[in-house]
Amino acid sequence: MATRVLLADDHPLFRDGLSTLLQARGMHVVGEASNGLEALEQARALKPDLVLMDVHMPQMNGLEATRLIKTEMPHTKIVILTVSDDDADLFEAIKSGAQGYLLKSLASQTFFEMLDGVARGEAPITRDLATRILGEFARHLRQEDPSARREANLTEREKEVLRLVAEGSTNRDIAAKLNVTENTIKYHLKNILEKLHLRNRAQAVAYAMQTGLLKKARVL
């Protein structure tokens, strides 16, 4: 079944071009919005699988719209697609529940490769932006009391999955390495996030870095 996509961007020409590219790749563009408020209304009405959301739009910006959509429709995937590489926008987008953050300057092939990963539960974020996100969340985790999170009682298999995620492995890579299905890996990741009270994959990686799971993996 084709992925149902909602486009939210205040530039009609950009939406037209992106819509054409998406549909050429077999995706179904079910709606368009020119601001965050319209995006929220369209998401409620259309129930898309994926929202491609700009940041700076009139009436309601994309970050606020992302927060509201994820609150009402937590299973809807949202990827920020913007010209803004501002750290504040980047960090707020991830904290608001966005699955990924992509810049409009990306090459089209890279863009579609990253979108393909969304369906597999991966986070479409370039290496440079990922490094900045991890540094920010690691800083926040250091400011918290880490003992509460360490009491989360992850199983050995969950720790192994988390280590592999933190090393940059995709769900498919992890499934092959552990000889299980991708759905099993998704199930483990869901449990990991719930136990650690984290919202997404990026925060889980930051946790693994901050608590030393990566170092332990190299010693084993």
Image (tube, rainbow, N blue to C red):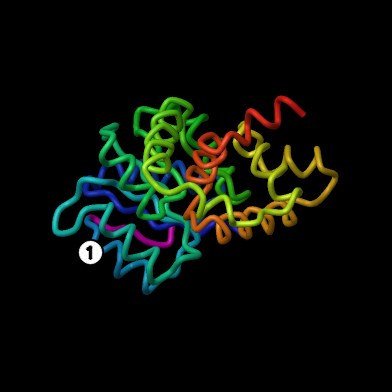
Quadrant where the C terminus lies?
Answer: top right
Q: Position of residue 173 (x, y in %)?
A: 73, 37
* Amino acid type of the residue tagged 1 in the rendering: Leu
Residue at figure coordinates x 58%, y 43% from the top left? 116
- The residue nearer to you, when weighing 60 against 2, is 60
For residue 116, above or below residue 109: below
Q: Residue at x 35, y 28 (%)?
A: 105
Drawn side of residue 202 relative to residue 189, left or right: left
Which image quadrant: the N terminus?
bottom right
Q: How many labels does the image show?
A: 1
Q: Which residue lies furthest to the left in this view?
A: 59
* Residue found at x 27% / y 52%: 62
Magenta residue check for 30:
yes
**Element on which disc 1 rests:** helix
Residue matched to label 1? 37
Q: Which residue lies furthest to the right in this view?
A: 179
Q: Residue 82 placed where, x, y %?
A: 31, 39
For the point 63% across and 60% down, which residue is it? 191
Q: Give the range drawn in magenta.
A: 29-34
Residue 55 in picture, x, y percent from top left: 26, 46
In the image, is residue 219 above or below residue 12? above
Left or right? Give the position of 63 relative to 160: left
Image quadrant in which you'd find residue 97 = bottom left
Is residue 32 magenta-colored? yes
Q: Nearer the viewer, residue 101 or 192?
A: 192
Q: How crowded is mark 1: few (under 14 residues within 10 Å), some or many (20 or more)?
A: many
